[in-house]
Image: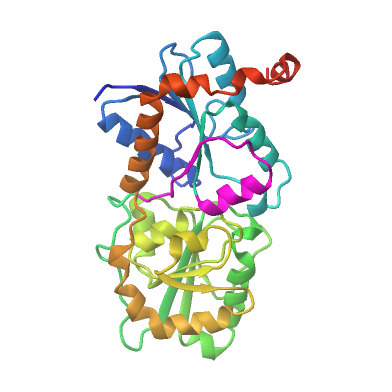
Amino acid sequence: MKSFKIAIGINIQEGPWGGVNPAGKAISSFLRDKGWEVVYNLSDPDIDLILLICPRENSQSSSFNDKDILKYLIFKNPNAIVVHRINECDERKRTTDVNKRLIEANYVADHTVYISSWLKDLFKTHGIEDKPYSVILNGGDINIFNRKGSSIQSDGEKLKLVTHHWGANYLKGFDIYTRLDKLFNYSTYSDKFEFTYIGNMPDDIKFRNTKCISPKSGEDLTMELKKNHVYLTASQNEPAGMHHIEGALCGLPLLYRESGALPEYCKGYGISFTFENFEEKLNEMLVQYDSFKNKMDSYSHNSEKMCVGYYNVFIKLLENREDVIKKRHLYRKPLHVLKKLF
């Protein structure tokens, strides 16, 4: 198989970080194992494929954006294939500029990858350009997140719930997490459940009955997750996320909100809930825990599966490079529109 050179638009971060970081690491490592050269800038004139991940100029994770790609294609190498990985939306943080910016940036892409069907459908309703796309679900690193040593609830033991988030936005599920914390004021819940929160929190959130742990990553995070029995995610409008995947790979059945892409990732491996029926579903998990625990061995959203998905898309595009470039819309924009991108 021919070796290729790929530029991935991400600044890899060490330690606890958002969901794009482990995905960038996994894809980079997988492609290097395939003999590809991986770079994180657009300096080289012989790049075969460019993966755009974070086009927003103020993103600490971004190493280049769509404007940099456009300059590269026009002035340095028009034969590079461009794939845009869309992993964000306004709906998850109540922002107002993310969708517009991603749709604008998508103009330079020959192919779009969405990290969930929910996100793909969302951008279709927002009017993103109709072009070839794939849906490739996120996956966690099973060398780190695995079921080895995962706790099992014993008779008479409280059911231990856990969640972890890097982002401290309220929509990460704090309406439910604070509600659960308050439920522990009553013995009907405190005698049956415990809750641990790992990560950052909004400044105005103060838990009274919840164990709080600072952000962790890697083996340290895995060790904390495995001390628990059930993974709780109440995130709203989640484009995909990594947190629930990491919990599930550690063998924890999922108690997940019916929102965003969570059902797409979690269905069959736990119990879904809404804001209205949370307490009912929480108690249901207490009863059904054993049956879901036995299913976790078959949870398959791992990084190997994810990377194979990207690799197959990349190879197909490169094998059909001439046809892909011929169909490119890049130069059909009026000159005054192109100038705005510089």
Identify the image quadrant of residue 31. top left
Quadrant of the drawing holding the N terminus: top left
Identify the image quadrant of residue 248. bottom left
Q: Is residue 73 left or right of residue 170?
A: left
Q: Is residue 139 left or right of residue 128?
A: left
Q: Nearer the viewer, residue 224 or 232?
A: 232
Q: Nearer the viewer, residue 115 or 158?
A: 115
Q: Is residue 75 above or below residue 149?
A: above
Q: Is residue 291 above or below residue 56?
A: below
Residue located at (67% from left, 42% from top): 99
Magenta residues?
116-140
Number of marks in the rendered image:
0
Residue located at (30% from left, 75% from top): 152
Q: Is residue 202 left or right of residue 337?
A: left
Can you see residue 38? no
**Residue 117 painted magenta:** yes
Identify the image quadrant of residue 14. top left
Residue located at (73% from left, 20% from top): 337
Can you see residue 204? yes
| Residue 312 image offset from top left, x and y in percent | 35, 37
**Residue 21 painted magenta:** no
| Residue 323 image offset from top left, x and y in percent | 45, 22
Q: Nearer the viewer, residue 308 or 234?
A: 308
Q: Is residue 8 above or below residue 78?
A: below
Q: Nearer the viewer, residue 331 or 247?
A: 331
| Residue 82 image offset from top left, x and y in percent | 49, 26
Pick out the residue farthest to the right.
336
| Residue 91 image offset from top left, x and y in percent | 66, 52
